Amino acid sequence: MNMLPQLQVAVDIGSREHYVAIGLIDGCILDEFAIAHTPAGFDLFFHRIEQQERLYALPVAVAMEGYNGWARPLDSQVLQRGYQLFNVNNLKLARFKEIFPAPAKSDVIDARKILELFQLQSHLPLAKGVLQAVEPVPEANRRLKRIARRRRQLVNEKIRVQNRLQSDLQAVCPSLLDITKSVDNLWFLHFLTCRELLPKLQRLHIKSLLEIPGVGLNYASLIRDWQSQARFSDEAEYVCPMILEDARRLLALMTTIKALESEIDQQMTDSVCAQHIDTIPGFGRVCSAELAGEIGTLDRFPKQSSFSLYLGMAPLDNQSGAHKGAKPPKHVNTRARRAMMTAACRHMACVPESRAYYDKKRAEGKTHNKAVRALGRHLSRVIWSMLRDDRDYVEPNLAGEKKVA
């Protein structure tokens, strides 16, 4: 089936400069130029496109690498102009370049190759799927995506700081760790940071201890027992400032993460997608927000199998001769996959039927991750049906009905 006439714009994205090629579906190149990643560069980009629009009176379609990455905010401005936007699948573009190689490698050639794929996508089977249409995403889901990603980054940083703090405490004063089960306890962090020098903690009186936020009589008693036999290593002089710095950073991270989680709660009230996913037992507001943000809109996916593949819950067949197996796909959203794996583990702890399915897969010889992914495959079908039909999760009844009616 032939494509409708349109102006096709290919953009090879760089960190500071982008190269643009404008052409028609018959292969004719109308214009080529470079733009800086600045407001002036963006103005030039749209000005040159509008010049061709006035000449040919055709709708505009733009294909660019790195949608929602280095392309920002040019990609959002393209959508605001009402142009159709396509994201270039870099892995498939690389395969295309291997099959139809150019004599050299440059930004000009890359932009022309994107334009060739643009023109061939309705004729060449290899070109299908290389350009993925970017559908409008609800504003609430866009915000959830940014907030949830920011929270995940801070949580990862918190884990690194926490591990470093625990290691340093073990080296300087191991007995300090004995008074707490985890170094990220708020009362313990407030205790560590209540004085500028760590050795001064062993001379605090009971009155001063009770003034520390979160420290009551029970914790004060534990601290008093530690004070009676506290010893610091020779490294304390230069390691203790590092410990205090990490403890303060940990407190700041926990405060910021808590604020982001409150913001997630507020944004979820405006996200239909997040509200539906949140009704699945075990998913919780954070995983639901992450999934809603990464999914964006169901219109992006032509069928349910594509949706499961995007979430990382659908392995690909890997068969050769008598060998039959599966391999993990590369075209997945790693953040959505992590959220699905976490949510699936929590889900099977809440739903006996899901736990039984997991145990069945383990009995078949599958590893823990493969069994969880198999359960996630079914859950991805459930989520697809829920979002498609605009409905919440339905608990299975004793008659063994499906989870989504």
Image (spheres, helix red, strand yellow):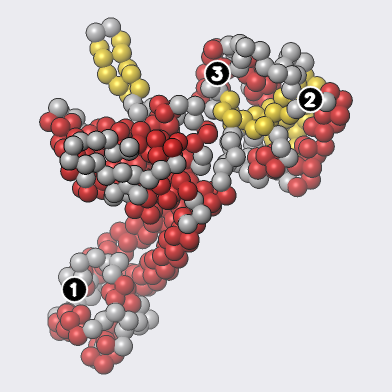
Looking at the rendered image, the disc whose residue lies closer to the viewer, 1 or 3, is 3
- What is the CA distance from the residue labelled 3 to the residue labelled 2? 23 Å
Q: Amino acid at mark 3?
A: Lys
Q: Which residue is mark 2?
A: 58
Q: Which mark is residue 179?
A: 1
Q: Is 232 left or right of 305, judged from the image as shown?
A: left
Q: Which mark is residue 16?
A: none
N-terminal-most mark, 2 or 1 = 2
**Pointer 1: residues within 10 angstroms few (<14), some, or many (20+)?**
some
**Is disc 3 placed on a helix, strand or loop?**
loop
Q: Residue at x 41, y 28 (%)?
A: 304
Q: Amino acid at mark 1?
A: Ile
- What is the CA distance from the residue labelled 1 to the residue labelled 3? 61 Å
**Is disc 1 placed on a helix, strand or loop?**
loop
Q: Residue at x 30, y 33 (%)?
A: 378
Give the quarter of the figure containing the C terminus: top left
Q: Is 151 left or right of 134, judged from the image as shown?
A: left
N-terminal-most mark, 3 or 2 = 2
**Pointer 2: residues within 10 angstroms few (<14), some, or many (20+)?**
some
Q: Amino acid at mark 2?
A: Leu
Front residue of this view, candidates 30 and 285 = 285
- What is the CA distance from the residue labelled 2 to the residue labelled 1? 72 Å
